[in-house]
Image (cartoon, helix red, strand yellow):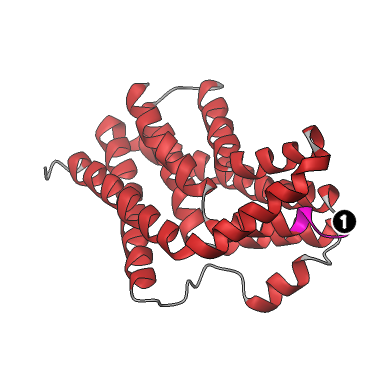
Amino acid sequence: MTNLWTALVPLMIGSAILPFQIAITVLLLRSSAGRFAAVAWVAGMTTVRLAQGIVFGLVLGGAARSSGDAGAGLIESALLLVVAILLLLMAAKYLLRQPDEDAPAPRWMALVESATPGRAFLLGVALVGLSAKLWAFTLGAIGAIVEADLGQPAAGWAFVAFVIGAEAVHLAAIAMTYVAPGRSGAWLDRISQLLERYNRLIMVAIGLVFGTWFLARALRGFGLV
């Protein structure tokens, strides 16, 4: 169980702190639809992640059962290797000041402030469904859960915990507007300023730290280190 959470927690953090996602949440909370749009946006992301968990959990779970414990470990290692490569490539691109292909296009961002809850939901679906990095994080989590061989319903709850962790920053920002509506505007402005100022540094740090971590785990799983 400890090995499972040492894999899941970094995957949760990596999924949660991607700046462009947080920027969208902040923009939606400051839009005309406000909290309704932000909740719909998170619901869209959650819907896709749960669908990925159901479909690929069954596929990878079946593959692991047919190949035994060694096969499950190789599946997890392979998925973590993919995550590591994507993150290290992301860090290199930001160091070289190359554009992030997973970040929403500027015209998408321009539409966020006027998005209805329905459009915000579809934006959440599209972002998680099209982002290679978020696919890698989710498949890495599924692989770790399959390898842990928890059985049902424990495996399902472990994946739900991953989804909540992956969306923790967005949920906290929404909760902030309910708990302290009078002060939330200033907080959201401050978050926007910090994201704009440190976006490149954050992305490089995420790529290098988590990419190296997952690369080490993958190589250890393959018995190479």
Q: Which residue is mark 1?
A: 33
Q: Quadrant of the C terminus?
A: top left
- For the point 24% across and 34% down, the residue is 70
| Image location of residue 99, percent across then percent down | 46, 76
9 left or right of 222? right
- For the point 74% across and 36% down, the residue is 175
| Image location of residue 201, percent across then percent down | 41, 61
Q: For label 1, count other residues whose C-alpha is less than 10 Å away and answer few (under 14), some (14-19) or many (20+).
A: some
Residue sitting nearer the eye, 151 or 190: 190
Q: Is residue 111 above or below residue 55?
A: below
Q: Is residue 38 above or below residue 109?
A: above
| Image location of residue 77, percent across then percent down | 29, 44
**Kind of residue at badge 1:** Ala
Q: Is residue 13 above or below residue 153?
A: below
144 left or right of 106? left
Q: Is residue 78 above or below residue 172?
A: below
| Number of on-image labels | 1
Residue sitting nearer the eye, 138 or 68: 138
Magenta stretch, main secondary structure, is: loop
Residue sitting nearer the eye, 146 or 132: 132
| Image location of residue 115, percent across then percent down | 82, 64
188 left or right of 12? right
In the image, residue 152 lies in the stretch drawn in magenta: no
Magenta span covers which residues?
Answer: 28-33
112 left or right of 22? right
